Amino acid sequence: MSKVRTTLTIDQAVLRAVKHSAARSGRRDSEVIEEALRRELGLDLLEQLWSRNEMSEKKATELAVEAQHKTRRKRR
């Protein structure tokens, strides 16, 4: 996965907590921040689910279209 550099403005207390967590775990500040964002955004859970998925993209699309059709209102 490619990384990009960014600048953000955060509360000093939050940055202090990030630095303490990074120091305790032997990681970089950016790793602690990225992990927290992934967890908050649910990306870690999605990646776990996707890694266990054995359904083909074609079958997933078919199921999605079928579900969409079932939930649409019937025309009168």
Image (tube, grey):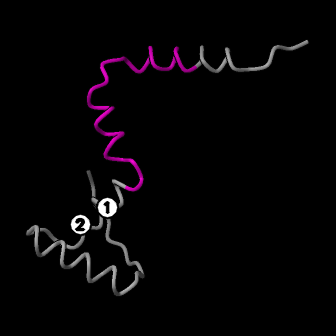
Q: In which image quadrant can residue 72 be found?
A: top right
Q: Tag 1's secondary structure?
A: helix
Camera-nearest residue between 54 and 13: 13
Camera-nearest residue between 41 and 58: 41
Residue lying at 42% horizontally and 82% vertically, measured from the top left: 9
Q: In which image quadrant can residue 2 be found?
A: bottom left
Q: Give the residues in magenta.
A: 40-64
Number of the label disc, if any, that sits on residue 66: none
Vertical position of residue 56 compared to residue 13: above or below: above
Q: Tag 2's secondary structure?
A: helix
* x, y percent for residue 39: 34, 53
Kindly indicate whether the residue at mark 2 contacts the one at mark 1 (C-beta within 8 angstroms): yes
Vertical position of residue 57 compared to residue 46: above or below: above
* x, y percent for residue 52: 27, 26
Vertical position of residue 7 compared to residue 64: above or below: below
* Residue type marked 1: Ala
Residue lying at 10% horizontally and 72% vertically, measured from the top left: 24
The residue wearing badge 1 is 36
Question: Is 27 colored magenta in this rendering?
Answer: no
Question: Is 54 colored magenta in this rendering?
Answer: yes
The residue wearing badge 2 is 32
* x, y percent for residue 70: 67, 14
